[in-house]
Amino acid sequence: MSKSRSVLGRGLEALITGAEPETTRTQVAGVIEISLAQLQPNPMQPRQQISVEALEELAASIRAHGVIQPLVVTKVGEGYQIITGERRWRAAQMAGLESVPAIVKETTPREMLELALVENIQRADLNPLEEASAYQQLMDEFGLTQEEVAAQVGKSRVAVANTVRLLRLPDEVKQALTDGQISEGHARALLALPTVEQQLCALAAIRRGGLTVRQTEALVRALQAEPAEDATLSAGHALSPQDRYVVERFEGRLGTRVELLRGKKGGRLVIHFYSDEELQAIYQAVVGESP
């Protein structure tokens, strides 16, 4: 294992311990003061969203106590690029500081991503999709295997693989996960469904019924166990564009899976529900009053 890999494996403490001193007016144990104007964000930062409220809270803390933990940066041209500590940098700007403490390290682009990822995971700062995207980027751009990624971040290969699988979900499900409407447990349960249509129907059921992860897993099992004859009937009678529009409107209004099955004369409209709470919600949507 290379020296850079062993440093990464030990986490941020190794970075601070191994920092090389630099000549500056303010310097303590390898930590120097760098002007905020000289700093620029890490283009490989895995965190894609930063809460304004959290930044304001951190800025208030910095006003009172200063920046306690130094940033880790690398020299780029006449300035510095942040490896870890972008949130502290932004909060320091809000707090009105002119400079922040930092440790200067020489890194490769891959190490920049790895270090930022390790710090954010240690601090639990990433949402599941940000973490998944960072793992995928390490594999796609730098050729790491899942085992190597797992070793870098201190997780099992299975945990890394399960997190990366979240990227396969439909955009609507991923947005619900990012917005906190569903948890990572909900999202992982939905991965067991084979079609986007089933995943979106299950998502609607979770939203409408407030389903727990365990209830969602039961819903997924119910969808997987639907009679084969129903699937055959649906496949044998493709919906017309007009019927498809009607079904989509029903599903959007009721928040659950709806089937329209036509026969020679008439047909069936099947409304699925997966909990008593969802049945009550459907009743209220159709009848206009609580059951």
Image (spheres, rainbow, N blue to C red):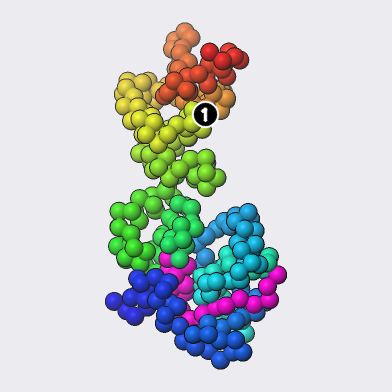
Residue 160 rendering spot, x and y as whole percentages: 35, 56
> Circle 1 — which element?
helix
Residue 81 rendering spot, x and y as whole percentages: 56, 76
Considering the image in quadrants, where does the N terminus appear?
A: bottom left
Res. 264 visible in picture: yes
Q: Residue furthest right?
A: 96
Q: Is residue 211 above or below residue 280?
A: below
Residue 180 rendering spot, x and y as whole percentages: 52, 44
Q: Is residue 85 above or below residue 232?
A: below
- Provide the residue span drawn in magenta: 96-118
- Classify residue 97 as left or right of residue 287: right
Q: Is residue 130 magenta?
A: no
Q: Residue furthest bottom?
A: 23
Residue 15 rendering spot, x and y as whole percentages: 43, 77
Q: Residue furthest front?
A: 64
Name the residue located 39 percent from the left edge and 52 percent from the top edge: 163
> Crowdedness of circle 1 by 10 Å Cα count: few (<14), some, many (20+)?
some
Name the residue located 45 percent from the left edge and 52 percent from the top edge: 128
Quick one: 148 or 37, which is closer to the camera? 37
Q: Quadrant of residue 161?
A: bottom left
How many marks the image carries: the answer is 1
Q: Is residue 100 magenta?
A: yes
Q: Quadrant of residue 63?
A: bottom right
- Classify residue 29 as left or right of residue 50: left
Name the residue located 47 percent from the left edge and 19 percent from the top edge: 279
Q: Is residue 273 above or below residue 44?
A: above
Read off the residue under disc 1.
208
